[in-house]
């Protein structure tokens, strides 16, 4: 896909862009809402109506009755989810259409269908529940809904596991193996009961005995930002800051999560920073834009990135700029919105509604 902003938006000053954004916001009033994920640039967060993680923003999209235009400063799967959760009276826009998610791309529909076809020999719909992380394309959310499963985010993954095991013997979790594994450990699943399906190998690189004995089948996928964090980062931080605290995202590898003082979703991390006593020193293991915003918001605390000099930035989240937002807002009637076609939308909605019900 090729995308290029018109010259007038590329060359506009920040002052001009802000004036244009505010003008549209004033004109549209309650017909418009701008959603921004926690990993967005600081200047975009400042122009949003709601800031949150993918779960919280999905709920907001589902509940907005008077809104006609939803502009989602995030990545593609988030805007898709907003479209799935809202009716045809609302139109969803992604300011930068190139903002995707490498983790979501690790779970291709053809590969998941091939895996499921083999897993049908081990009970399929009768014994296995698919749980799709929010970071997947609409087609895989639809697959999940069609097979009785649900979507989860890092906020409610434990609740999704509880829901799944109340109904089925096994869970098929994709695409992030680390979130799936950390949630399993937190839920009380033994490490030997969780196996990894490697989509690049025949039958996932697993034996029949491994699959038969497993409780959780994890897709081989990861977030390139969160796998940057290493145990030695925590060890160094603790040497330098004996009284400091470490909070990390559950997409980090388990050897990082188990050494941290706390782990949780982006909302959890924000709340952790807010609730920490004045003067606290906190190292955060997640995307750098959120870390920088926490450091600025809670300036009475020392908040730093866990990996030090390593720049843990999500390039796709970083794609969206004030220029993109201004262009989108001024051209809502002319640019292509995010639309999920039927029957994909209905099947995916089933899985997303279960996510919101599980909470």
Image (tube, rainbow, N blue to C red):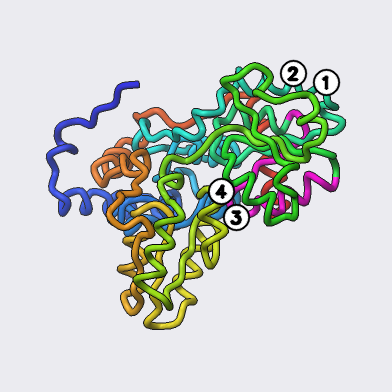
Q: Which of 83 and 235 is in front in this view?
A: 235
54 inside magenta stretch: no
Q: Mark 2 points at which residue?
A: 117
Query: Can you identify the residue that label 4 sits on?
Result: 58
Q: Does the magenta stretch include residue 157?
A: yes
How packed mark 4 is, by other alpha carbons closer than 10 Å (few <14, some 14-19, many 20 or more), is: many
Q: Name the residue under label 1.
A: 121
| Magenta part of the chain | 146-166
Residue 166, placed above or below residue 203: below
Q: Is mark 1 on a helix, strand or loop?
A: helix
Q: Looking at the image, is mark 2 or mark 3 earlier in the sequence?
A: 2
**Disc 3 versus disc 4: distance between alpha carbons?**
12 Å
Identify the residue at the far bottom of this view.
Answer: 278
- Residue with the mark numbered 3: 155
**Which class describes the residues within 10 Å of circle 1: few (<14), some (14-19), or many (20+)?**
few
Q: What element carries label 2?
A: helix
Gap between marks 2 and 3 measured at Cα: 30 Å
Q: Nearer the viewer, mark 3 or mark 4?
A: 3
Q: In this view, does 259 lie to the left or right of 118?
A: left
Percent coordinates x, y for residue 25 in the rendering: 34, 53
User: Looking at the image, which is closer to me, 227 or 141?
Assistant: 227
């Amino acid at each position: 896909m090729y995308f290029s902003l018109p010259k007038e938006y590329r060359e506009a000053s920040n002052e001009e862009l802000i004036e244009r954004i505010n003008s549209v916001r004033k004109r549209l009033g309650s017909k418009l809402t701008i959603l921004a994920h926690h990993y967005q640039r600081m200047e975009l967060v400042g122009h949003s109506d709601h800031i949150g993680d993918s779960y919280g923003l999905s709920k907001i999209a589902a509940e907005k009755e008077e809104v006609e235009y939803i502009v989602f400063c995030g990545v593609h799967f988030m805007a898709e989810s907003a479209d799935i959760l809202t009716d045809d009276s609302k139109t969803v826009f992604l300011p930068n259409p190139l903002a995707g998610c490498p983790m979501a791309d690790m779970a291709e529909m053809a590969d998941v269908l091939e895996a499921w076809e083999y897993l049908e020999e081990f009970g399929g719909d009768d014994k296995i529940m698919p749980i799709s992380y929010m970071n997947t394309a609409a087609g895989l959310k639809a697959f999940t809904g069609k097979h009785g499963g649900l979507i989860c985010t890092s906020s409610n993954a434990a609740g999704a596991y509880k829901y799944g095991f109340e109904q089925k013997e096994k869970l098929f979790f994709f695409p992030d193996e680390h979130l799936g594994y950390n949630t399993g450990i937190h839920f009380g699943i033994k490490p030997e009961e969780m196996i990894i399906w490697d989509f690049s190998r025949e039958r996932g690189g697993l034996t029949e005995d491994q699959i038969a004995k497993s409780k959780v089948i994890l897709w081989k996928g990861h977030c390139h930002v969160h796998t940057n964090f290493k145990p030695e980062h925590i060890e160094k931080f603790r040497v330098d800051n004996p009284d400091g605290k470490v909070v990390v995202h559950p997409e980090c590898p388990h050897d990082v999560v188990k050494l941290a003082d706390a782990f949780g979703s982006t909302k959890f991390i924000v709340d952790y920073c807010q609730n920490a006593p004045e003067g606290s020193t906190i190292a955060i293991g997640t995307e750098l834009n959120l870390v920088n915003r926490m450091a600025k918001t809670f300036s009475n605390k020392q908040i730093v990135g866990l990996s030090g000099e390593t720049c843990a930035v999500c390039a796709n989240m970083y794609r969206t700029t004030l220029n993109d937002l201004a262009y989108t807002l001024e051209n809502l009637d002319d640019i292509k919105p995010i639309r999920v076609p039927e029957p994909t939308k209905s099947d995916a909605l089933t899985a997303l509604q279960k996510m919101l019900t599980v909470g």
